[in-house]
Amino acid sequence: MGSYLCPSDMSDVWHKDEGNGENMDILEQRVERLEEDTRQIKLDLAVLTARSENFATKTDVAELRAELIKEIAASEARTNIRFEKIDEKFERMFEKFNDINSRITWTLMIPALVAVLLWFIKTAILKI
C-alpha cells in the first residue's frame, strides 16, 4: 500500500534549527512530506473502504450459521432414514436366511437323520 510515516525517517528534517531562513525550508519540506503522507492515507482509506463493503457482518455470519445448522440437521435426518432402510433390508435378508435354514433343516437334514437312524437300527440292532 505504499509508504508508511515513520518519525525516525524524518529525524534529520524535524530537528534542524540553524536560523537564517533554513527554518522556512525545513517547514516547507515537512509540509510537502505531510501532503504526500495525506495522499497516501487517502489512497489507503479508499482501498480499505472498498474492501469493507465485502466484509461479512455479524448478522451475515449468524444467518449462515443458522442455514448450516438446518442443512446439517436435514442431512442427518436423510442419513438416518437411509440407515433405517438399510436396517430393514438386512432384517428381511436375515428372515429369508432363517426361512432357507428352516427349509434345509426340514427337507434335507431330518430325512437324512431318519435314514441314518434307520440304517443304524437295521445294522446294529437287527443285524439284518
Image (cartoon, rainbow, N blue to C red):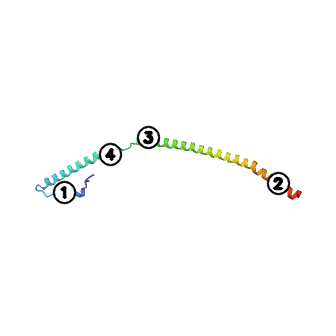
**Front residue of this view, candidates 3 and 106:** 106
Residue 85 quadrant = top right
Q: Which residue is mark 4?
A: 51
Could you give the CA–CA distance between mark 2 and mark 3, rounded to whole angstroms? 78 Å
Amino acid type indicated by mark 4: Arg
Please identify, in this view, whether the residue under mark 3 or under mark 1 is nearer the observer: 3
Amino acid type indicated by mark 3: Glu
Circles 3 and 1, Cβ within 8 Å, touching? The answer is no
Q: Image quadrant for the C terminus?
A: bottom right
Label 3 Cα crowd, 10 Å radius (few <14 / some 14-19 / many 20+): few
Circles 2 and 3, Cβ within 8 Å, touching? The answer is no
**26 left or right, relative to 119:** left
Could you give the CA–CA distance between mark 1 and mark 4, rounded to whole angstroms? 35 Å
Could you give the CA–CA distance between mark 2 and mark 4, rounded to whole angstroms? 92 Å
**Front residue of this view, candidates 29 and 87:** 87
Closer to the N terminus: mark 2 or mark 4?
4
Could you give the CA–CA distance between mark 4 and mark 3, rounded to whole angstroms? 21 Å
**21 left or right, relative to 111:** left
Please identify, in this view, whether the residue under mark 2 or under mark 4 is nearer the observer: 2
Q: Residue at x 71, y 49 (%)?
A: 101
Circles 2 and 4, Cβ within 8 Å, touching? The answer is no
Closer to the N terminus: mark 1 or mark 4?
1
**Front residue of this view, candidates 38 and 99:** 99
Of helix, strand and loop, which one carries label 2? helix
Q: Which residue is mark 3?
A: 63
Amino acid type indicated by mark 2: Leu
Q: Which residue is mark 1?
A: 13
Q: Which residue is mark 2?
A: 117
Q: Residue at x 73, y 49 (%)?
A: 104
Of helix, strand and loop, which one carries label 4? helix
Label 2 Cα crowd, 10 Å radius (few <14 / some 14-19 / many 20+): few
**84 left or right, relative to 10:** right
